[in-house]
Image: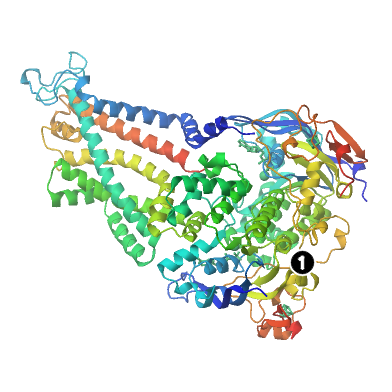
Amino acid sequence: MKENVLEVKNLKTYFTLKSERIGSEPEVVKAVNDLSFEVKKGEILGIVGESGCGKSTLGKTIMRLNHKTEGTISYKGSEIFDLDKNELKDFRKEMQMVFQDPFSSLNPRKKVGDLLAQPLKIHGMTDKKEIDEKINAIMREVGINPAYKGRFPHQFSGGQRQRIGIARALMLNPEFIICDEAVSALDVSIQAQVINLLLDLHDKYGFTYIFIAHDLAVVEFISTRILVMYLGKIVETADKDVLVKTHMHPYTKALFNAFPATDPQGRENKEQVVMGDVPSPIKPPSGCHFHPRCPHAKDICREKYPELKEVEPGHKVACWLYE
Amino acid sequence: MENTEQNKLEKNSLLKEALFQLKGNKPAIIGFIIIAAFIIMAIFAPYLTPFSPTDQDISIRKTAPFVTEHLLGTDDLGRDLLTRIIFGSRISLIIGTISVGISLTFGILIGLLSGYIGGWFDNIVQRLVDIMLAFPYILLTIVIVALLGPSLVNAMIAIGISQIPSYIRVVRASVLAEKENDYVTAERSLGASDRELMFKSILPNCIAPIFVQATLGIGNAILSSAALSFLGLGAQPPTPEWGLMIASSREFVTSAWWIVTFPGIAVFLTVLGFNLLADGLRDVLDPRMKS
Amino acid sequence: MKDTNTRETLLSMENVNVSFKTHRGTVRAVRNLNLKINKGDTLALVGESGCGKSVTAHTINQLIPMPPGVIESGKVIFEGRDLLKLNIKEVAKLRGEKISMIFQEPMTSLNPVFKIGDQIAEVFMTHRQISRKEALKRTVDLLNLVKIPAAEKRINDYPHQLSGGMRQRAMIAMALASPEPGLLIADEPTTALDVTIQAQILRLISDLKKDVNMSVLLITHDMGVVAETADRVVVMYAGRKVEEADVYSLFDNPKHPYTLGLLNSLPSNEKYHNAERLEAIKGTIPDLLTIGDGCPFENRCPDAGPKCSGTFPEETKIGEDHSVWCHYLENQEPSK
Ligand SMILES: Nc1ncnc2c1ncn2[C@@H]1O[C@H](COP(=O)(O)OP(=O)(O)O)[C@@H](O)[C@H]1O
Ligand SMILES: Nc1ncnc2c1ncn2[C@@H]1O[C@H](COP(=O)(O)OP(=O)(O)O)[C@@H](O)[C@H]1O
Ligand code: SF4
Ligand code: SF4
Ligand SMILES: [Mg+2]
Ligand SMILES: [Mg+2]
């Protein structure tokens, strides 16, 4: 059994919104609401859920780009919110992030060469030739011709920009990469290329990934373990193969049902998809947050939140159906 | 497939695209021509006229325009009006640049900090800005000059200071918008310091609106300095300052209209030029970063 | 299987060419395009970003900005008239009454300062002589039809108060408010939405199509969306039509290397159970500025041969309603 590189315990990240009217209670968004999980070295943990369920907030909090409200995040045994300035700098070298929007995640005023040189310069590399060689090597690695170093991001297509974003994350030889919807904004044909690239890099360098996406099909393909989130909470988690075969939580089932078909045969008879919209995380529904959309909701579901329970080793579900 | 030539071709495409669009914008071109003429006039002033802006010759006082070698006539002290206007452009250009320089420096610095840091600092700055903007702009300028004492230099400082709030507003607004972009978060996650993020990442992306504001600002400054000088709070005689020229010839409006009119036209045209160009730039630069 | 060929044609595009004259040169966005939409059908136009799908839609709706756009040739026949010959007034009437469009980001086409209900009621009132009260009543009915919960309350919401999915529903309702919703053009209507919400919206469009008997031109880059909703499919690449078929025969027997590539790109494709990698299409779409007259897919195509760069292939009919434009169909491995 591999060691845990990241351990998250009872993590909460709340945002207090400015009150709209004077005197009214400020509203609180419980974006990440009491999450606990571990990530083992070399694994690809997929995190899936509809937009607004707190995936990005979780990713950013782990990167210490957000505040945390409560709980602990320990990376290789040290609490990341306790790191001092120098330790934080080292941590930033080891853990990197790839962002969703290939158009806003690259500074439009910087040439690709400068974008890629920046992390090296921040971390003290000064030798021009060395920097240049490293950039060439990484650009080749992600499939961008190093001759394009002098171009600006807007001169590339979306898929190429995402490759540049990945290249930037690789510059510091990281060990842990958080991909926040890294392929969601891409066309399916380009998405497939980028997924393959991420997997190639994983095999070659043994990175640990957290792969965040709202598209279960993508998460299912890439991950070794999956964590399903709903309104700031984990509702189900299991190894990929287990989850594909036996998904238990009604929400996970709904996500699997919403898979777009790859064949028109039998589409008329397809099971009905989840009705209704994602509720607001400001005032989540009482009890099990999923109950307004759940076809199996019982009385207790409206009253009490079901705890995340282990139903089999490594397979946890939070649902009253499995008490 | 793609070679270096194409690479070169695309390199400046953003600037080219902007110029390409500006070309189609007639008012902006007119503005640009006026400003170019104004700057050339300022730089080459001594070579453009055989006369001196300050030499008086009572014998030819109030010569009418378009009849003698004094093309636009002379003023009440016999000085060549065209020469004075040409030399006046120098002073206006200096006033414009220096006062805008002052407002830019402080406006960018404070606006950037205020937008980036946020919180209580931002709150305080914004309330101060609100208060300063609540005063009529020209009144504020006058108060500052009154405190510093009337002179051309103090007028520049006053104009510079009283424009700072609008620059803070502009800079802060675009910093707030820019800092939401993922590239800022991305660079922070790489370990970039706040200073680096503010000055090297965010600021360069806010240049467009600041540039527009500065262009407008030069026109504004020229107008304000004319007004201050007109009120006797700016340039002092015999400086060939346009506002002062208008002020000191007020009494001849009926007897020698040209002494008042031509400096007035000079002010009007220059300010118009800057405003037209600023408008054009806004159109071209605003829908940012088209791919 | 439906016999889609014998249906009545609602709209047909004949030999349409559209270009954009930019300072860098001429972008040939749509070339020699022929397509037809049958009454009551959903035609899916599929292809990746930048291959001319939106330009095609905008040609129908006369939304191509001119300049820089130029419709160089072709006809768009709708109910017996060539839309490209209509004057501005006729076009506006047509847009309001018979052809409506929904976009990827509904926020850009809803007015942020007016209530949803008023915006939809406005459509009723411009085309029919009815009172505001009556229009609002019909608006509520429509919002119910597109399954917006608590419609009576929702009509008082502003667009930003709705979620992405709800906004898209409101846009669809607005499209249905026109007097004779004949053709709905949906340009990537679900691309910005969650998969769960996408499934709901696609279902809604399919249901409505049956209920009000309208035709749909559905634009997407996702073969999954095609499989869920289309009756017929046109696969487009770099401004060209490369394959056309009814949906069942396309998925049964996809022929064009690009179509195969799109299908293989789906991670949900069954063949990827336990697979290590996806079979991605390599490379990117060519620059439409410098593109030649050959097959535009040449630089990415696994089957390309010497003929491909010279001329664009002729049509090969491989079924009742199934055509492919490729020089080297014989090079392919047996399908799927
Ligand atoms: N800085 C912030 N201030 C206030 N609310 C926030 C902030 N960041 C995220 N949120 C809220 O937290 C919730 C979760 O957001 P996010 O983590 O971005 O979700 P996801 O990535 O799953 O789509 C959302 O309701 C969002 O509006
Ligand atoms: N207004 C325009 N000016 C210049 N080029 C344009 C314009 N609109 C579209 N194009 C070009 O036409 C091609 C097709 O675009 P589009 O139809 O929007 O693609 P998509 O299939 O993604 O909808 C692209 O190469 C695009 O750059
Ligand atoms: S706890 Fe109840 S409402 Fe929640 S998912 Fe389970 S059955 Fe549905
Ligand atoms: S014509 Fe040639 S390049 Fe085009 S798809 Fe067929 S084999 Fe490939
Ligand atoms: Mg997110
Ligand atoms: Mg499009």
- Compared with A47, A182 (above or below) is above
- In the rendered image of this protein, does residue A192 appear above or below residue B213? below
**Residue C82 location, x and y as percent?**
77, 32
Residue C237 vs C67, above or below: the answer is: below
Horizontal side, residue A131 vs residue C78: left or right = left
List the residue tagged with mark 1: A256
- Dot 1: chain letter: A
Q: Quadrant of ligand 4?
A: top right
Q: Position of residue A173 (x, y in %)?
A: 55, 58
Residue B291 in view, yes or no:
no
Q: Depth check: C274 or B204 in front?
A: C274
Front residue of B37/B115: it is B115
Q: Residue at x 50, y 54 (%)?
A: B183
Q: Secondary structure at mark 1?
A: helix
The amino acid type, in three-letter code, at marker 1 is Phe
**Is residue C260 left or right of B143 when viewed as pictured?**
right
- Quarter where residue B269 is shown: top left
